């Protein structure tokens, strides 16, 4: 049965992340960039100024909403996770260093895509039965495109519910257990025979923590992510920059290998990765897995922001993709490539490759800090995706199903901690692609609204 599931998933995955996906993702991103005259580049300094200004400005959100900064932290909480650690490692192992180049390119276009998603989500949002602000692709499809496109909103929500259990929970928790067990084994606190028990204990503990945060409502989610995201990002950046300083002499050659490997993978990987398209596919798919530009999920969190200016909140989307992919994903790639750890090109790899990059540079003691950073990354992603799943299932049914969903979602953490997730990673990537299709169609059709809103904001 598992063999059949794997075969079917491989076929679907290869189609979704094949030529059609490359055309749709790059095409919509480029189309939006052209229509807004590359707003993500022209207004990049302004976007950074607005984001940092709001981060430093303390304010209370009204009932049923978050502050604009809490909203971006919740969105970042969902994006800054295993995609930055395990995802980047996997992209380099399968697609070679050149995959990082395609990750950068998808991020540049993705900044405009995320800007459009967030702007539309805030513009077309509603209040639910509890008085909470709700929005996202299903709402801008419903309110922006009309009843004839309702099926598209339902498709997005259905794929969203199916995606969150793998992408948002099980794979994240698996990264937490991998990081903690790695630290415990390195310091001989436990041996291999105790790993199974350790996984069960961690799975149950994480399930309880996830439930406590999610069942506390939108304000508790915003409060947790507002504190957790800046801490975890700063800790990881400091550790990564330290590795680059230790191997500063290798940095120019690594950047050269990234650029040359994007167009001639075999020349960099010794022929193991010989496909230009494999490098592009892995870079783009893992980049989107990380920053979610094109998926539309991040806009669900931004729609909760207590703001009356959709475009101003949309600028947070530019900052979000830049921070996630251009900064954190790039640092992860440089840690792996500069540290000199052996990369088995053509074979799957995950968080263990990133951990090896840190430990080879600092020694085993750093596994404590990498474990803390990875736990923060993965836990925050689990929280963010819990909100996404709740909004999707609420759209399909009603607000009455939110709490039962959150209980079930929390319990999946135990599954993620105790089973082998090799196949689940691939399935999660497939559902990510399926979610992107309805959203990209909607963004293309609503591009005129984005241009209109941006013009009104910047010309006022």
Image (cartoon, rainbow, N blue to C red):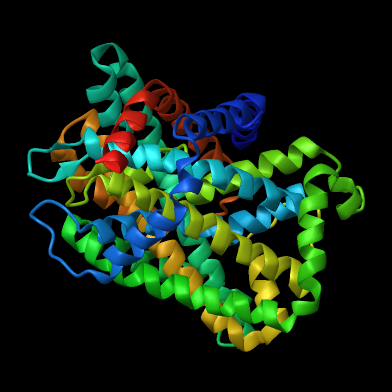
Residue 389 shown left or right of residue 370 in the figure? left
Q: Residue at x 32, y 50 (%)?
A: 386
The quarter holding residue 192 reads: bottom right
Q: Nearer the viewer, residue 135 or 158?
A: 135
Name the image quarter holding the N terminus.
top right
Q: Is residue 155 visible?
A: no
Q: Going by the picture, which residue comes out furthest to the front? A: 459
| Image-based side of 74 in relation to 368, left or right | left
Query: How many numbered marks does the figure carry?
Result: 0
Q: Is residue 379 above or below residue 34?
A: below
Viewer-proximal residue among 395 and 112:
112
Q: Nearer the viewer, residue 321 or 75?
A: 321
Q: Is residue 137 above or below residue 194?
A: above
Task: Quarter of the image for the C terminus: give it.
Answer: top left
Image coords of residue 112 (percent x, y): 46, 41
Q: Would residue 73 be found to the left or right of residue 286 on screen?
A: left
Q: Residue at x 61, y 88 (%)?
A: 365
* Closer to the camera in the image, 149 or 130: 149
Instruction: Residue 32: give x, y in percent of width and height.
Output: 47, 31
Q: Residue at x 43, y 55 (%)?
A: 319
The residue positioned 51% from the left and 31% from the top of the image is 34
Image coordinates of residue 245 in percent, x first then y, are 69, 81
Report if residue 123 is visible in the image.
yes
Relative horizontal placement of residue 309, taking residue 229 as reference (left or right):
left
Q: Tell me where residue 458 sits by quadrant.
A: top left
Q: Position of residue 246 (x, y in %)?
A: 72, 83
């Amino acid at each position: 049965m598992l063999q059949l599931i794997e075969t079917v998933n491989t076929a679907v995955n290869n189609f979704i992340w094949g030529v059609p996906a490359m055309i749709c993702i790059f095409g919509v991103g480029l189309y939006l960039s052209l229509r807004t005259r590359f707003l993500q580049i022209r207004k990049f300094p302004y976007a950074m100024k607005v984001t940092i200004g709001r981060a430093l400005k303390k304010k209370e959100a009204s009932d049923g909403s978050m502050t604009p900064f809490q909203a971006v932290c919740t969105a970042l909480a969902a994006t800054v996770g295993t995609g930055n650690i395990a995802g980047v490692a996997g992209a380099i192992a399968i697609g070679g260093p050149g995959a990082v180049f395609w990750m950068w390119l998808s991020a540049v276009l993705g900044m405009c895509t995320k800007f459009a998603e967030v702007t539309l989500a805030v513009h077309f949002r509603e209040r639910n039965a509890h008085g909470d602000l709700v929005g996202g692709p299903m709402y801008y499809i419903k309110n922006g495109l009309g009843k004839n496109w309702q099926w598209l909103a339902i498709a997005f929500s259905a794929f969203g519910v199916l995606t969150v259990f793998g992408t948002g929970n099980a794979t994240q928790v698996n990264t937490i257990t991998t990081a903690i067990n790695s630290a415990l084994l390195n310091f001989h606190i436990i041996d291999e025979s105790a790993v199974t028990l350790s996984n069960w204990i961690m799975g149950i503990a994480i399930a309880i923590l996830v439930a406590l945060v999610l069942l506390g409502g939108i304000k508790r989610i915003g409060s947790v992510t507002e504190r957790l995201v800046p801490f975890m990002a700063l800790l990881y950046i400091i550790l990564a920059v330290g590795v680059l300083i230790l191997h500063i002499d290798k940095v120019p050659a690594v950047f050269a290998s990234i650029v040359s490997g994007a167009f001639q993978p075999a020349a960099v990987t010794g022929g193991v990765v010989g496909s230009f398209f494999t490098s592009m596919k892995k870079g783009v798919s893992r980049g989107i897995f990380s920053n979610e530009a094109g998926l539309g999920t991040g806009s669900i969190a931004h729609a909760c922001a207590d703001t009356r200016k959709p475009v101003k909140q949309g600028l947070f989307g530019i900052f979000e993709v830049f921070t996630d992919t251009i900064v954190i994903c790039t640092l992860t790639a440089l840690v792996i490539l500069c540290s000199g750890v052996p990369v088995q090109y053509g074979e799957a790899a995950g968080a263990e490759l990133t951990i090896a990059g840190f430990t080879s540079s600092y020694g085993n003691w750093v596994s404590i800090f990498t474990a803390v950073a990875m736990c923060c990354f993965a836990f925050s992603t689990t929280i963010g995706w819990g909100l996404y799943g709740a909004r999707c299932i609420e759209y399909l049914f009603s607000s009455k199903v939110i709490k039962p969903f959150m209980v079930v979602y929390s319990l999946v953490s135990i599954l993620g901690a105790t089973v082998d997730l090799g196949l689940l990673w691939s399935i999660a990537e497939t559902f990510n692609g399926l979610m992107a299709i309805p959203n990209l169609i909607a963004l293309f059709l609503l591009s005129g609204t984005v241009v209109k809103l941006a013009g009104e904001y910047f010309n006022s």
